[in-house]
Image (cartoon, rainbow, N blue to C red):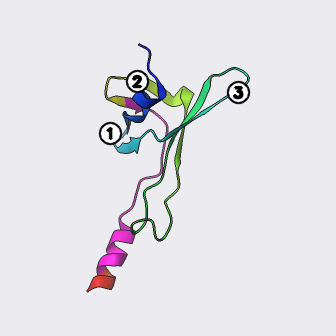
Amino acid sequence: MTCCFEDLRGKEIIQIKTGCKIGFVDDVEFETRTAKICNLIVYGRARVFGLFGREDDYVIPWGDIDIIGEDTILVSCDFPQRTKKRVDMFKNLLK
């Protein structure tokens, strides 16, 4: 199967170990000398509509990709679990 960058951008990345959705491919890093893809990048979520910046980006090494399917990319790298502490903090502010 061959695909172009636009095809990669439409694929959702899922972590195999937890089944957690990481996001969609936003960018690709590649080695200029060999033209090989090094990393897939998923931009962090915007905080409060982007007013408070973004969370950290996910950088997924090409070696950690297990399967590239029609709609999804399955990866086996470890990511920190997202917490909902920020959401709870904002709920307290709105009370």
Quadrant location, the N terminus: top left
Neighbours of disc 3 within 10 Å: few (<14), some (14-19), many (20+): few
Q: Which residues, given as a range, are shown in magenta?
A: 73-91
Residue 68, numbered label: 2
Q: Tell me which residue sits at (35%, 65%) in the image.
A: 84
Q: Quadrant of residue 89?
A: bottom left
Q: Give the residue pinned by disc 3.
A: 32
Question: Which x, y percent locates residue 25?
Answer: 44, 38
Vertical order, 76 against 34 (above or below)? below
Q: Give the residue pinned by disc 1.
A: 19
Residue 45, numbered label: none
Q: Amino acid at mark 2?
A: Ile
Left or right: 49 in relation to 95: right
Going from N to C along the chain, the mark reached first, 2 or 3, is 3
Verify CB contact (< 8 Å) between mark 2 and mark 3. Answer: no
Question: Which x, y percent locates residue 24?
Answer: 40, 41
Q: Amino acid at mark 3?
A: Thr
Q: Nearer the viewer, residue 70 or 86?
A: 70
